[in-house]
Image (cartoon, rainbow, N blue to C red):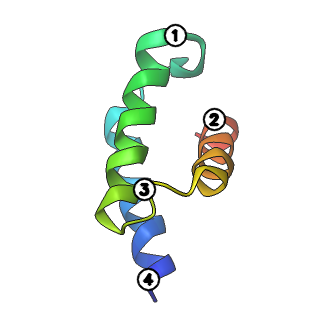
Amino acid sequence: MIVARIVKDIDEIVKHVRFPDWQNTTQGEREVWVALRRTLLKYRFHTVQELFDKVHGYIRQYY
């Protein structure tokens, strides 16, 4: 159940901060990075670097 909430939160936040071609700009990368970190912090997963890297990679590819 917690995984579903995390995924929903990440999806909502990323849809809010992203913009066309965000993956190719420093500003876009930074905004998504910060939003993802904040979401993981909310669930106390902000220190799990492997999780962050996997989720960030997924977001870069599919958003």
Note whether 52 is above or below 44 in the view shown: above
Q: State the separation of the CA atoms marked 2 and 3.
A: 13 Å
Instruction: Decide: few, some or many residues near mark 4? Use Cα within 10 Å; few <14, some 14-19, many ≥20.
Output: few
Residue 4, how many percent across, how many down?
48, 78
Query: Label for residue 25?
Result: 1
Q: Residues within 10 Å of mark 1 (few under 14, many from 20)?
A: few
Q: CA distance from mark 2 to mark 1?
A: 12 Å
Instruction: Give me the disc on residue 10.
Output: 3
**Amino acid under disc 3:** Ile
Q: Which residue is mark 2?
A: 60
Q: Whole-Å distance between the Cαs marked 4 and 2?
A: 23 Å
Q: Amino acid at mark 2?
A: Arg
Callout 1: helix, strand or loop?
loop
For the residue pair 46 and 18, the one nearer the viewer reads as 46
> Is residue 1 found left or right of 55 in the rendered image?
left
Between the residue at mark 1 and the residue at mark 3, the CA separation in whole angstroms equals 20 Å
Quick one: label 4 or label 2, which is nearer the N terminus? 4
Instruction: Give the vertical position of 17 relative to 43 (above or below).
Output: above
Name the quarter where the C terminus is drawn: top right
Residue pointed to by mark 4: 2
Q: Amino acid at mark 1?
A: Thr
